[in-house]
Amino acid sequence: MKKTLLKHGASANVRDKQNLTALYDACVHGKVKCADALLQANSPLGFKDASNRSELHHACNFNTPELVELLIMFGAEMTAVNELGNSPLHVCASKGTIDCARVLLKKGANKDAVNAASNTPYQVAVMFNNHELAEVINSFKPEEVGILLLLFFFFFCLSS
């Protein structure tokens, strides 16, 4: 429906009574294609609800790694924190959304960030019994981000 409205000239910048956008709503409901269409139509990014949760927090909460990737590609702030000081990676840790956590880590999310309770994402994962995710966070090396970028650059140069 939103894609049809956009096709017929509707604005991607309209906000609801809580000052949230259609993009925010798409992220709350895990609608990747809708979010993509809205981002392509220059919908603003970075809005937060009354609990200070961003679009990226919701994408992580509902385990939509494709949406996490898309939001980051369009500039979503990986360091955004909600009212509890939780980053999107903290949200992954509490919900056990391992695929989203992997995307965040590979894109450079800070695995050592602390929330308002002074807990890292690793500690949050352990507290919520998400031990596999805790191990992914704990074993991730930040230098792996550089290696992935180098491999991408190398592959891109070879294919040109």
Image (cartoon, rainbow, N blue to C red):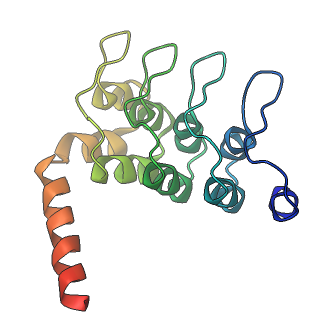
Residue appearing at x 14%, y 67% in the figure? 150
Q: Residue furthest bottom?
A: 159
The location of residue 126, given as percent across then percent down, is 34, 29
Q: In this rendering, would 76 be left or right of 45?
A: left
Residue appearing at x 57%, y 44% in the figure? 59
Q: In this rendering, would 12 be left or right of 156?
A: right
In the image, is residue 4 above or below residue 68? below
Q: How many numbered callouts? A: 0
Residue in front for this viewpoint, 111 or 18: 18
The location of residue 151, given as percent across then percent down, is 17, 72
The location of residue 91, given as percent across then percent down, is 47, 32
Q: In this rendering, would 119 be left or right of 140?
A: right
Residue appearing at x 78%, y 32% in the figure? 15
In the image, is residue 57 above or below residue 133? above
Quarter of the picture containing the N terminus is bottom right
The location of residue 160, given as percent across then percent down, is 25, 89
Residue appearing at x 39%, y 37% in the figure? 78
Residue in front for this viewpoint, 126 or 58: 58
> Image quadrant of residue 129?
top left
Q: Residue furthest front?
A: 9
